[in-house]
Amino acid sequence: MPTRFDILLQGYITGTLTPPEVEEFLQLVRDEDLRLPDAVQQLLETADHPPLPPEKEAELAGAILRRARRTERSRSPFYWLAAATVVVVAGAGLLYMLQQEPPAVPMQTASIISKIQPGYNQATLVLADGTTVPLDSAGNQQIRRNIRQSNGQLHYTPGNQASQINTLVTPKGGRFGITLPDGSKVWLNSASSLRYPTAFTGQQRVVELKGQGYFEIAQASSKPFVVKVNDMEVQVLGTRFDVMAYEDEKAVNTTLLSGAVRVKNAAAAQTLRPGQQAVLEGGGTHIAVQQADTAKAIAWKNGLFLFDNMDLETILREVSRWYNVEVVYHVKPSAELYGGAISRSMSLEAVLHMLEGSGFNHLQLEGRKITVLP
């Protein structure tokens, strides 16, 4: 039988609560014994619902942050919120934020008007002759005899055509998936590119990556698959892995989910096991191997920002790529670390509201520019 909280949660999402019931629901949210994640997950699995308007997201965030301020602090140098969880029902799940003592958030927040929407499936295919083909979620087109776009994906099929080099490019605010001629699948994150042949004819299957890509490689033991990233190579026979190699990040990270890969450059080589990550610091030659948070590495592919002990600058770099905005700093960001998950389907305004409410810096949005203030 549904509990009182279950009934109020459903009413809050559908907008059918009276003002006293809204206050009752928000008070339950602030209850230390709240089982919000389980309740929301069950609701998402069993009921159709409209998205929460941004102002409701903000209202609920405020209630949770006030609840979290009363939770027990850990013994680390940072004060972590034990279970601050806010519903993000844009089709997408849960958010919790971990940080130092946040400023108070008023109960009634101003309505947030969504101006900058999240990224979506969009890319440009650059053919060998220089022809460019725009791609998006809705497109269905036969581009060449062996190249077709359907259901927001680009598909290559084997053929007798001569091999040529094509490039798939995603802009800021875009992502796209591709099935290569050998059946391997690649998902490109925003501001990324993949350069690849239209047929794998040599002794190796070689592609070149800039930015970030998630790979599921079709097995072909006689023809290893190689991903070139700057001066580094990831060699694999059949596996699932993620490579993050943005120029504005401090390191190139290769995260292995299954199978085996060998990461090498001119000075070193390391073989990874599932659950491990190879880290090549920018400008360096040493390849370090560490245990990986695989969920974090591929969160972007699953529609999430997933933060784990991350500073504001690192978070905003990821945010800027997905929402296609510029970040300007008028002050050095405070040193608190964040943790949690935020749906990538939320508006930028809602994301910034949650980050600002959980930290010590003011985030001002004007046009497509985020300014970090004291």
Image (cartoon, rainbow, N blue to C red):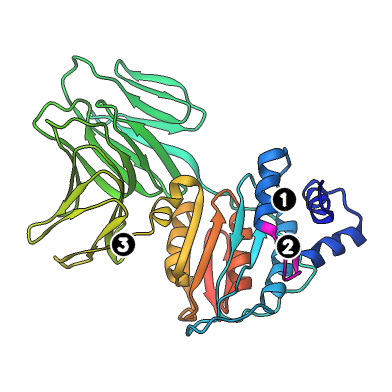
Residue at image location 92% in from the left, 62% down from the top:
20
Q: CA distance from mark 3 to mark 2?
A: 35 Å
Residue at image location 79% in from the left, 64% down from the top:
28
Q: Give residue 48's position: percent from left, percent from top.
A: 72, 37
Do residues under tags 1 and 2 come within 8 Å of each other at their CB atoms? yes
What residue span does the magenta drawing correspond to?
A: 29-36
Residue 323 seen in render: no
Residue 231 seen in render: yes
Do residues under tags 1 and 3 come within 8 Å of each other at their CB atoms? no
Judging by the rendered image, the residue that carries numbered circle 1 is 52
Quarter of image, res 60: bottom right
Total marks in image: 3
Judging by the rendered image, the residue that carries numbered circle 2 is 60
Q: Give residue 140's position: percent from left, percent from top.
A: 46, 22
Disc 2, SS: helix
Quarter of image, res 175: top left
In the displayed structure image, the side of residue 266 where residue 307 appears, left or right? right
